[in-house]
Image (cartoon, rainbow, N blue to C red):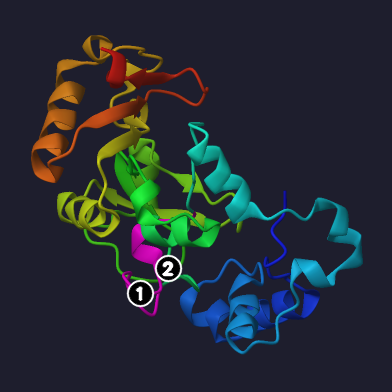
Amino acid sequence: GLDPQCAIIEPKHIETDKSGHLASEIGTTGSGTGPCNADRVLRRAKLARDVPELQRFLRDVPLEVNNAIDDGESVLIEGTQGTFLSLWHGTYPYVTSKDVTASAACSDVGVGPKKVDEVIVVFKAYVTRVGAGPLPGEISWEEAERRGWAEIASVTGRRRRSAPFNFDLAKRAVMLNSATQAALTKIDVLFPECKGARSFNDLSAEAREFIKRIESEIKIPVTFIGTGPEVWDIVDRRFE
């Protein structure tokens, strides 16, 4: 269902987002999310409960989720964006309009910290960023194309900037999210010979060594490893 407290992004928010200083200086997606969040802070945002057409979709989401947890069901809460785009913990002012850490995701849904069993932090095998802001170790677009790291952002259609995996950022992300395990995506881009692998031993020695180094640095296990674009292209080490 849709929670009655959800704020509604209106055309005026999108217009403000695309025409303001965020578009020219920060590199906003232009979705209107920031101006909508600003209106919510000012207590003037329209909520889902205020829209007649949405009434049939409204549900008490915190109650639904907490009841499911209390009944022993598995509940997955997925956050948005990367840790260092957090309004509070990111590379301000080159950040998004809210906190995006695991604790914020749970708060958004209405789940308290005592009900969280596992926190999975997700890393790419290399670092990417869209728009302005610091990116330690950044390589050129031409070099990214040579390495196979060149990506186009799905929302904005802009080029993603890229850099090698940053162990210091990874350690801080684990700390800020109280992560208990990690997922690593796009190992097949860094090590093409690993494409489609389904078990850890099917990965190349170089890839396995890279993953072991990550685990040594961040002090939590890498339990999921993405080896391709399909949903089944994954190594699930929880059962190995």
**Few, some or many C-alpha atoms within 10 Å of disc 2 (few <14, some 14-19, many ≥20)?**
many
Q: Position of residue 156 (x, y in %)?
A: 60, 59
Q: Is residue 58 left or right of residue 183?
A: right
Task: Name the mark on residue 88.
Answer: 1
Identify the image quadrant of residue 227: top left
Residue at 58% x, 55% y is: 62
Report x, y in % for residue 238: 29, 20
Q: What residue is shown at x 31% (from left), y 70% (from top)?
A: 89
In the rendered image, residue 163, in percent from the top left (x then y), is placed at 28, 51
Q: Is 221 on the left-hand or right-hand side of 111?
A: left
Q: Does residue 36 sit above or below 4 in this rendering?
A: below
Mark 2 belongs to which amino acid? Asp
Q: Quadrant of the C terminus?
A: top left
Q: What range of the chain is rendered magenta?
A: 80-94
Secondary structure state at the residue bearing disc 2: loop
Rendering quarter of residue 169:
bottom left
Residue drawn at 17 percent across, 52 percent down:
171
Q: Give the mark, 1 or 2, whose residue is nearer the N terminus.
A: 1
Farthest residue to the right: give it. 53
In this rendering, position of residue 17 left or right of residue 56: left
Residue depicted at 39% across the width and 47% down the height:
115
Let me know if residue 36 is in the magenta part.
no
Contact (CB < 8 A) between labels 1 and 2? Answer: yes
Disc on res. 5: none
194 is higher (above) or lower (below) than 8 = above
> What is the three-letter code of the residue carrying label 1?
Trp
Q: What's the mark number on residue 99?
A: 2
Considering the numbered disc 1 on the image, is that residue within a helix, a strand or a loop? loop
Q: Residues within 10 Å of mark 1 (few under 14, many from 20)?
A: some
